[in-house]
Amino acid sequence: MTFAIITPALITGAFAERFKYSALLLFTALWSLLVYAPICHWVWGGGFLGSAGVLDFAGGAVVHVNSGVAGLVCAIFLGRRKGYGTEVITAHNPVLTMIGASLLLVGWIGFNAGSAGAANDLMGVALLNTILAAAAAALTWKVVEYIEKKKVSLIGMLSGVVAGLVAITPAAGFVDPKGAVIIGLIAGPACYASSVWIKKLLRYDDSLDAFGIHGAGGLIGALLTGVFATTAINSLSEGANVGAQALGLLWTIVYSAVGTLVILFICKFTTGLRVSEAEEAAGLDTSLHGEALEH
């Protein structure tokens, strides 16, 4: 149920600042039942993807690729925020972002290591792999950021941390620490490219890079699980291969995209989807909830 909670929550990062609250409630309920639950069953509940040898320790396809693809569909369907591409939009509060990312790291250790199901050796290696991949991806994200901008930002470092966490999630209990470091090193620049260059090229407005980090990172991690999984860590790694991982990703991408699109149409013709321009300009805290941040 923790995974079921976090997966639709990740999608909200793609459409932040423009989605009606009533639509959010309906979308979350329908998406959890009609998109998340089937994919979860296919991979973890005895479904055909698990039987086909798809490895997903803690949610690479089920959580991150699933939510990342759904977020991309939502971002394209809704359109861009007012001022996006013409006005500079920066992080509102880097300090709160740092606090949030720190809490996220602790929680991520909990659900990656906790996916071992017991306090055992597998839990220990999953925990270590999670921290190593996060650190490695933060490093390579910063390197690419510095090469491009000649600056290293806190927001960039935290984005790299999350990219590493996402990428190691499907692999945490299948790879050794060396594999975890390599996955993290690859995830940093790959997620940077997806979040910065590809998003700019295609001109879609994924507010908090739900696809750029979770979608791309999940894809990378799931595929590399097929490369680095070893029976020295987990006997279930026997027969691991990139082909099986790609099959799981293909089913996840297609089903998530189509299912999300159908649900968006349902919401559009019932609750409506997007707030008005005036509500968006005022900010949703104020216009929808009657609350405002004190300065």
Image: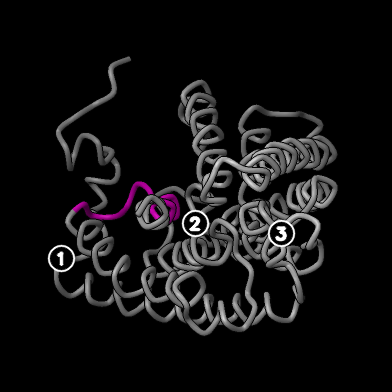
Dot 2 or dot 1: first in sequence order is: 2
Q: What is the x, y in percent for residue 164? A: 68, 46
Magenta part of the chain: 10-21
Q: Secondary structure at mark 2?
A: loop
Q: Which residue is mark 2?
A: 205
Residue type indicated by callout 3: Asn
Q: Which mark is residue 151?
A: none
Disc 2 from disc 3: Cα separation: 40 Å
Residue at image position (53%, 34%) is: 90
**In this view, 243 is above or below 109:** below
- Say if 250 sits above or below 210 in the image: below
> What is the three-letter code of the residue carrying label 1?
Thr
Mark 1 is surrounded, within 10 Å at the Cα level, by few (under 14), some (14 to 19) or many (20 or more) other residues, namely some
Quarter placement of the C terminus = top left
Label drawn at residue 234: 3
Query: Residue 140: image x %, image y %?
Result: 80, 41
How crowded is the residue under tag 3: few (<14 C-alpha within 10 Å), some, or many (20+)? Answer: some
Relative to the observer, which residue lies in front, 141 or 179?
179
Residue at the spot 68% in from the left edge and 33% down from the top edge: 157
How many angstroms separate mark 2 from mark 1 (CA)?
A: 22 Å
Going 17% across and 43% down the picture, which residue do you hit? 288
